[in-house]
Image (cartoon, rainbow, N blue to C red):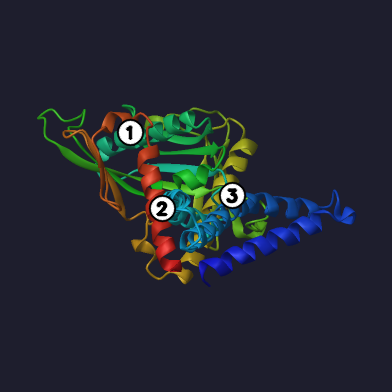
Amino acid sequence: MNLDESLSRVVVRYEELSAALADPQIAGSDEFVRLSKEIAELSPVVEAVNRLTAARSEIADLQSLISDPESEADVRALAEDELATLSADVPDLEHAVRLMLLPKDEADERNAILEVRAGTGGEEAALFAADLFRMYQRYAETHRWRFELMDINETGIGGYKEATASITGSDVFARLKFESGVHRVKRVPETESSGRIHTSAATVAVLPEAEDVDIAIEDKDLRIDVFRASGPGGQSVNTTDSAVRITHLPTGIVVSQQDEKSQHKNKAKAMKILRARLYEAERAAQDAERAADRRSQVGSGDRSERIRTYNFPQGRVTDHRINLTLHKLDRVLAGELDEIIDALTSEDQARRLAETA
């Protein structure tokens, strides 16, 4: 389907929705809510289509005026100047419309579960995992998202073996979904006395938060164990069996939660994480069916893929998927991630546009 056919379908659908919403019989119904949401999503697309259509129409009028032998010379000159300006604008208008017509990831508007785990590198990897976790916390603060700690497994000197948070706000998953993968760091560890540069790694997973209606989990598919929460070094931090471990038997996914003193709260948090992991697994399976080369794509979410290196001696960050290097490591770790995320989003959009061409 070419661009003009797509534009025509959008306009026709918008008109159908407008007519349907004018029917007083559906006022206040679930159908009214559903149609209102759809027309709200289409409105900016239709506005962009109208701008493009108007520009094209004006170009046709100007061309007609210029080719008219009866047009005065000064009028023709003005028309040629205006035609040049409009002709330069049309490709940008068409590109903007094409972007709006790209199929949306249904999870983009969802909240997210962030999981950061220390990888290879021992204590230094755990310290790096803590740095990454704080980086995302600061990034959430700049976007005024709610960052809620769900679980954390600390080491004795400030590192994190693993940490999980719930991030709530506008377009959280859309902004963070390309962060999943292996993050590598090159630096002299605090624990290194000889000053040698070490390479360590941490794994980041960003999962769209699932609703109850997305994933059906039956009680018979769960094994729930309770145990006493413990802190770093194994010392007991709770005198009751409040910690919860949930095993999803069909998939083998295990989620443990001990951050809260209440067993019920820990179970609720564990179920929230489990739903997110199951939802992401289902999304990944669907994506794999649609694209056999998914692992080569930006944002594949393949956690075995090294996606970014944080080089402390050179003060730079490199995202290997798009060959982007920024010489502002401190600012990135302080939460200034938008430049990287914007570049990843643009690359993903360009790839998808190429696939639809």
69 lies left or right of 298: right
Residue bearing mark 3: 224
The reply, left or right, for residue 19 in relation to residue 153 is right
Q: Along the polypeptide, which appears first: circle 1 or circle 3? A: 3
In three-dimensional space, the C-alpha distance between marks 2 and 1, rounded to whole angstroms, equals 42 Å
Q: Is residue 220 above or below residue 291?
A: above
Disc 2 residue type (three-letter): Ala
Camera sees residue 191: yes
Give percent across and percent down for residue 66.
46, 59
**Amino acid type at mark 3:** Ile
Residue beneath label 2, please?
84
Q: Quadrant of residue 12?
A: bottom right
For discs 2 and 1, the disc positioned in front in the rendered view: 2
Residue corresponding to mark 1: 332
Taking the image as drawn, is residue 159 in sight?
no
For the point 53% across and 33% down, which residue is it?
Answer: 145
